[in-house]
Image (tube, grey):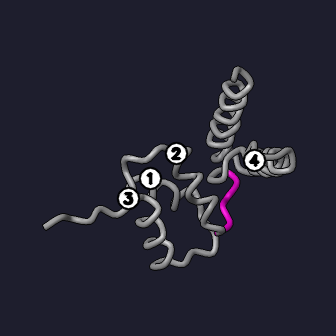
Amino acid sequence: MGTTRQTKRGLLSQYLAETRPERLTEADFGMLRERLAPVSDSYLRSLLRSSGIPLDPVVEGVRQDSFENLERTLCALAQVYAADRECAAACRRAVLTGKDHARLASRR
C-alpha cells in the first residue's frame, strides 16, 4: 500500500484554504518556509506569486519578468526601506538577490 506525498504546491493550497489570508506578510513567509521545508526562498516566492494573494513587498521580492514589474517591486521595496528601519535589511537582501539573478541571466 503506497503512501501519497503531498506536493509543496498542494501543502500551500491547503494552508491558504484553511487560513484565507488577505495578504501574505514576512511572518507568513517564515512560517511557510518552515512548514514546507525543505524549500528554497525563490521557489516559495514563485508559488506565492502564482496564488494570486497580495504579497508584502519583502515577500514578493524583486520581479524581473517585465520592466513594469521590476519598477513596481523596486519602488515598493524602496518605500518599505525608507519607512521601516527594521525591514531595511530584508529589503536590501531582496534587492541584492534580484541583482544577483539579473547578473546570472545576463551571462546566459
* Residue 1: quadrant of the picture: bottom left
Residues rendered magenta in the picture? 53-57
In the picture, measured across the screen, residue 8 lies left or right of residue 59, that is: left
Q: Secondary structure at mark 2?
A: helix
Q: CA distance from mark 3 to mark 1?
A: 6 Å
Q: Residue at x 76, y 46 (%)?
A: 65
Q: Which residue is mark 1?
A: 33
Q: Which residue is mark 3?
A: 35
Disc 3 vs disc 4: which is toward the camera? 3
Q: CA distance from mark 2 to mark 3?
A: 13 Å
Which residue type does callout 1 highlight? Answer: Arg
Q: Residue at x 68, y 42 (%)?
A: 91
Q: Earlier in the sequence, mark 1 or mark 2?
A: 1
* Residue 47: quadrant of the picture: bottom right
Q: CA distance from mark 1 to mark 4?
A: 21 Å
Q: Which residue is mark 2?
A: 41
Q: Which residue is mark 4?
A: 77
Q: Residue at x 81, y 50 (%)?
A: 69
Q: Earlier in the sequence, mark 1 or mark 4?
A: 1
Q: As drawn, which residue projects farthest toward the left?
A: 1
Q: Secondary structure at mark 4?
A: helix
Q: Secondary structure at mark 3?
A: helix
Disc 1 + disc 2, Cβ < 8 Å: yes
Coordinates of residue 92 in the picture (x, y in percent): 68, 36
Q: CA distance from mark 4 to mark 2?
A: 17 Å
Q: CA distance from mark 1 to mark 2?
A: 7 Å
Which residue type does callout 2 highlight? Answer: Asp
Q: Earlier in the sequence, mark 3 or mark 4?
A: 3
